[in-house]
Each structure stands twice: as C-alpha cells, then as structure tokens.
Amino acid sequence: MPEEQVKKNIKAIILMGGPDKGTRFRPLSLDVPKPLFPIAGLPMVQHQIEAASKLENLREILLIGFYQPTEQLTRFVHEMRETYKIHIRYLQEYTMLGTAGSLFHFRDIILNGKPEAFFVFFGDVFCDYPLKQMLEYRQKWMRYLLMSVEVSQEQTKNYGVMGINPQSSEVMHYIEKPGSFVSQHINAGVYLLGSECFDDIAKVFNEQDHHGAMDDKLGYISLENDIFTKIAGQGKMFAYVAEQFWMAIKSAGSALYANRVQLELYKKNSPERLNPDYDTVYIHPSAKVDPTAKLGPYVSIGANARIGPGVRVKNSIILDNAMLKDHACVLNAIIGWHSVVGEWSRIEGTATKLDPDAPHATTDNFYLFDDKGKLRPSVTILGKDVVVPNEVIILNSIVLPSKDMGWGLKNQILL
Ligand code: GTP
C-alpha cells in the first residue's frame, strides 16, 4: 500500500523512568541512563523503537521520563529520528509521576491526532515484541490489552500477576507483586491502550485531588496499583499471552543475558549486524580487534574499544573505549567504559541460566545478595575507568567506577 494511504493511527510510548530508578543496575547506571545501556551494540530502548518503527501505521514515538534532557539523550533522540525516519521526541516529567501519572500528564500530546490506540512499553523489558500480533488481536472494546508471559512460580512474586479467563482472555484479577502464589501469568510490561483509559486515570486523579493528597503525592498514579487492580473483571482489560522469549532487564546479569538473546535474534533477522569472522559477535566499526584474539559466542564490543593479541572474550559486553591488553581473558563479564584490563589477567563471572520450568522467560537473580546476606555468584562487572593490572584474577565481583586495582578479587563488591 502506498504510504499516504496507510492511516497512521498508532503511537508508541516508552516509559524511561529516571535517575531514581534502575538502582539494581548499578554501577552501570551511574554513568548512563539505564535505557541507553547498549544491548548487542544498540541502546536498550532502541530495540523497542526499532520494533515500533516497523509498524506501518505508526504515527509517532514518545519517550517519557524524568531524566534531564542531557546532550547524550538529545543526541540519541536525534539519531533515532535520522535512523528510522520517524517522529520521535522526549518528554520530561517534572518529577516521578508513576506509570499512569506520566501518561496523564502528557495526555494532550498522546491524544493529539486522535490515535486509535497506543502502545506503552516499560523501558526495561526485552523480547521479540509481538506488536503486530497484539494489534491484530485487539478488539475496539478492549480498553487495555496487556502482554503477558508465563514464568516459574518462584519468579511471579517479583511481578504484576494476572488471573486470565481462558475463554475470553479477560484479566479477571490483577495483583502487583503478590505475597503468595496466584498465577504464572505475569505482566510483561507492554500494553496496547485505547484513549478511554484516560477516563479511568482521571477518576483516580480527581479522587486524589478531592481527598487532599499531599502536594508531592498529587499526580503520582500507578497503572498497575491504582488502575489494573480496580478494573480487573470489569470487561475492559484483556491479556495477550505471548510465547516468545521475554525478560526484564533489572540487573547487569540480565543485561548480559539480553545481549546474548539479541545477538541470536540478529543471527536470524539481521545477520549483517554481526561480524562474519566470529559466532554471534557484534563489533562497532571503530573498535580495533587483533586478528589473533578469539571472540564469541555472545560478545558485543563498543566504539573505540581495543582488543589485543591473544585475548579471549566469551559471553561479555565490552563498553566503548575499553582496552583488553595482550592475552587477557574475559568470560561472563561487563567491562566498563574506558576501563583497562592488563596482560594475562582474567575477568570472570557466572552466567545467568535459563529457568528450566519457564524456558522462554528469565529474570535471573533479582537481588545481589541471598537470604543470608551473601553475594550471589553473578556476572563480573567493572564500572567505568577501572584499571586492572597484569596477571590478576577477578571472579564473580563488582568493581565500582574509577578503581585502580592492585590485587585480585573473588565474590566481592569493591566500593
Ligand atoms: P522495580 O521492581 O522497582 O524496578 O519496578 P517494576 O518492575 O515494578 O516497575 P515500575 O512499575 O517501577 O516501572 C516499570 C517501568 O516504567 C520501568 O521501565 C520504569 O523505568 C518506568 N517507570 C516507572 N515509574 C515511572 C514514572 O514515574 N515515570 C516514567 N516516565 N517511567 C516510569
């Protein structure tokens, strides 16, 4: 169909959060807003933007967050506009307004042009987005269509959980982070909403106003806690249960797993993004890799990174301007921007494993420490500007930015 005949009546909104969110992503979120952290060479939210940009009836994409519109963020938005030839802009909340409050605050911009419906993405979920399928599945009377995936019973307590009528797919119950087991269907953080949802949000807003909510609380509304829990079972909210791989990127470990999944997806959908000399390896065109280095599988190398002779890297992310000196070995790790790993040093973590009960969804360790306060074995992370000397071993550890290390580490966090 020629472009002018396609009715551009769908919008996509990405909830980016802000500096107070993404705490489990530290130390990496100290140096970059979490949604801009690269997964397989592209900022996390770019994968969502790319998925949305493939919809032929997409009108525009709105990024909503309470990050300052820094040069980095502004440049990113500009690049997205150029790359995908779409309308895209960043809208800054004056404070954290919650998942519904932020939509409500910008409702005039969202409803401008009378979109038939709009997608809302959590900025930190990651999957092969079933957007076309959700559009086809949605009926006009479905005010809310929520993507859902099935996870293991153990994982459900960290998410919004829904009881779904198997015949009608209506969401009959919705509970956020339940204390006990309710259902294996969780909220996957991708919604397709009709404009009528603003009637429900307005009702909550007016009630807050009426009950004299404290000034700093006025306007904070959560879709999940304040809306979904109330409207479940009223014939308005439905679930699209997806079978494809899904995960939430909460910790650095899950970012590494997402990197792996995305590199596999490139292999299937856009092999030109992968370096042909290795298996599932992305190398930024400005990075310099010695031909004797052995890379892969599942490795992403950022801009201007330098990989020396005899280096071995597997299942890892090497961020921009990092340097791995001769014969360094990096396994299951994230090496921060401008960090240097000395000759013959070994940086090694423990990879996230898929849950055998829910092989299409993973969340890895939600928390860094176990019930006894011990650091769980996880990926090793070097923050920005860390210098590791020659012949040192760093195992299952997290090193905060700007550390000049003189010794090895095992199962530690170096503050
Ligand atoms: P945590 O477990 O605390 O990470 O939260 P959650 O997974 O229950 O999700 P939450 O509802 O806090 O956030 C869901 C998504 O919406 C994340 O991508 C957040 O960054 C984003 N988000 C949450 N609150 C806000 C908000 O007030 N404004 C904006 N713009 N985004 C938000």
Image: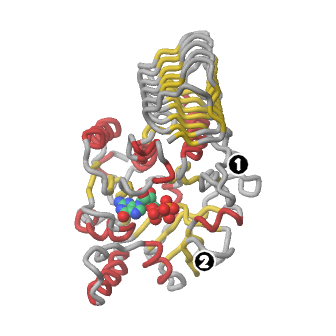
Q: Which numbered disc covers residue 14?
A: none
Q: Residue 278, can we see it?
A: no
**Residue linked to disc 1:** 354
Q: Residue 55, can we see it?
A: yes
Q: Is residue 26 left or right of residue 259?
A: left
- Between marks 1 and 2, how big is the CA–CA gap? 31 Å
Element at label 1: loop
Q: In the figure, 242 relative to 180: above or below?
A: above
Type of the residue with mark 1: Leu
Ligand 1 lies in which image quarter?
bottom left
- Measured as percent of width and height from the top left, residue 406 is found at 54, 25
Q: Is residue 255 left or right of residue 112?
A: right
**Residue linked to disc 2:** 168
Of labels 1 and 2, earlier in sequence is 2
Q: In the figure, 185 relative to 304: above or below?
A: below
Q: Residue furthest bottom?
A: 211
- Residue at the (33%, 64%) spot, across then down: 96
Q: Residues at badges 1 and 2 in contact (C-beta under 8 Å)?
A: no
Q: Is residue 370 left or right of residue 83?
A: right
- Measured as percent of width and height from the top left, residue 297 is found at 65, 28
Element at label 2: loop
- Measured as percent of width and height from the top left, residue 263 is found at 58, 35
Type of the residue with mark 2: Ser
Q: Residues within 10 Å of mark 1 (few under 14, many from 20)?
A: some
Asked which quadrant contains residue 76, the reply is top left
Q: In the figure, 235 relative to 145: above or below?
A: below
- Residue at the (42%, 72%) spot, across then down: 223
Q: In the figure, 240 relative to 278: above or below?
A: below
